[in-house]
Image (cartoon, grey):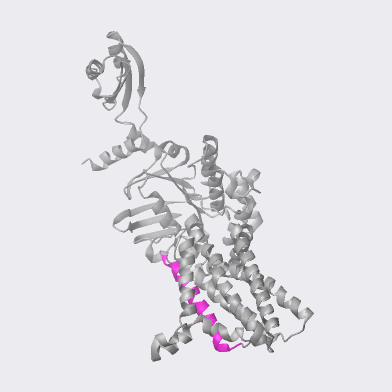
Amino acid sequence: MRKALVVCRRDVAALAGAPLGWIVAALFLLLAGWFFYSDLVFFVVFGAANPSRGLWRFVFLDVRLVVLLLLPLLTMRALAEERRLGTLELAFSWPVRDGELLAGKFLGILAVYLALLAASAIGPVVLHALHSFPLGPVVAGYAGLVLLGVACIACGLAASAMTDNQVVAAMLAYGVLVFSWFVSWNEPAGGETLGPVLLQLSLFDHFYGFAEGAIDTRDVAWLLAFGALFLFVAHRALGARSWRGVA
Amino acid sequence: MIVADRLGKRFGRRVAVDAVSFAVPRGEVVAFLGPNGAGKTTTLRLLAGVVAPDAGRALIDGHDVATAPLAARRRLGYAPERPALHGDMTVAGFLRFVAGMKDAPARRAADAAIARTGLAPVAGRRIGTLSKGVQQRVGLAQALVGDPPVLLLDEPTAGLDPERAAETRALVRALAAEHAVLVSTHALAEVGAIADRVVVLHAGRVLADERPAALGARMRSPARLDVEAAAPADALTAALAEVPGVRDVTVVGRVNGHARCRVEVAPDADPRPALASAIVARGWGLLALAPVEPTLEDAFLALLRGTEAP
């Protein structure tokens, strides 16, 4: 675990020192801030009585799109760039387990993502100071964003572990995430047997409850399982050098 | 101790390494010599555990790289040929990071590696801003972090200026006392300066495993001379071919009425005085008469001839 933290610290410093990290951070905060502001204006103008259904649901459903859009940009470099530079090959010659390396990468991006979420909470905090409202739905929404982030980061790392090309890594991650997102977009297309299965597999549906202010353990378990599955895939992709024969 | 035990590796249909076996005990520097594509880098990567072999075993201090990778890697310092470094980090920061990955005390291990490789003046600079030669030394320094007993160095002097290359060779020699060192190179001149033994690789196979002096002796014969004279090429060729001890003469160049010939000399013969006399006696101007230093290709041809001879 100590080595995972060493990798995590290095990656956070690398993201903080690179233009990409700052661009993604600026975009995230700009978009999240804009959605919060515009949804708040919508809520005030149309005067819905219930802030949970009338405001926070819209805010979190909008912000999840930003998460979907920006997290693959943070994860695409993580392993693909190291593979391209040859630093991954060097790391394979150090006494570090693939799992520790992967955990460090995962924690590094998660730490940056949590910092961005914390910064995006400034809007709700200021609103709460000006006008008190129940915090439960907001906490649920952020919990959902954290879990969604875990799932997206794991998926992005798996994609990044499979190639030495950042663009390919990002496209792979987008492909998987967008498919998981919209797999239940048109339920009837799945028919009577496949439809309910697709619904259960959809990232979109498992986030919906959080956006509405409800934390359902089934959703929590599903998002964590999604993350665990892709971390496993990433781990296998790193270990594949033993049978593929190339680093 | 490094042991390669019948190591084999294919990439698709191409055999990169074919049943390569040798051992490097502690206290010895072994040079891994071969032309580009001979399989040097692949063998080093197999020994470092970076790629898995298709056949055979690689042992680092008795630990099999495939079945006990962490134990093997704890005793290993590997410097790839291409300096693979995090350009956004400072030299000291990167080496401390490496120390963290190798369970070594970060500051002490990094400082020791910096001192050994003479990187102190650039310790605070970002790696990406350094010249290729300095980056090469940073790559060497990361292999030395934690002072592992086994070192695998892939062309550590490539891209260095002569002064730095000499320093690196001296460092490798100094490391030999406490380490088992395998250094790959395609520079023949380097071998004598650093190595106790040479393993020559050609087309993925070990062609020779011997002391540098023995290898050098094998390569000196047959010797060749370059002769340049102010003479017609055909007449010069005919005149040189008559000299005792000359096996063959070929014209390699004609410039401004001068001819340059390559003279193959019979083993144990030194026809240089006779060649000079033959030219001067005909009233031609002797412009050059010099031995041709054997190239690595010559060495391989000589070795190949040696191995193919009955």
Q: Is residue A201 above or below residue B155?
A: below
Q: Horizontal placement of B49 versus A46: left or right?
A: left
Q: Is residue B147 above or below residue A36?
A: above
Comparing A31 with B283, the one in front is A31
From the top left corner, tell me how far across and down residue B24 is, in percent: 43, 51
Comparing A46 with B163, the one in front is A46
From the top left corner, tell me how far across and down residue B234 is, in percent: 23, 18
Image point (25%, 25%), residue name:
B250
From the top left corner, tell me how far across and down residue A126 is, in percent: 75, 76
From the top left corner, tell me how far across and down residue A52 is, in percent: 66, 86
How many marks overall? 0
Image point (56%, 52%), residue name:
B142
- Name the image quarter holding the C terminus of chain B: top left
Residue range highlighted in magenta: A215-240
Image point (74%, 85%), residue name:
A133
Quarter of the view holding residue A216? bottom right
Indicate yes or no whether the magenta region holds residue A217. yes
Indicate yes or no whether the magenta region holds residue A120. no
Q: Is residue B277 at least partly visible in the picture?
A: yes
Comparing B19 with A130, the one in front is A130
Q: Horizontal placement of B304 versus B39: left or right?
A: left
Q: Is residue B75 above or below residue A36?
A: above
Quarter of the view holding residue A146? bottom right
* Residue at the far bottom in the pictured view: A192
Quarter of the view holding residue A119? bottom right
* Residue at the far front in the pictured view: A45
Q: Is residue A93 at least partly visible in the picture?
A: no
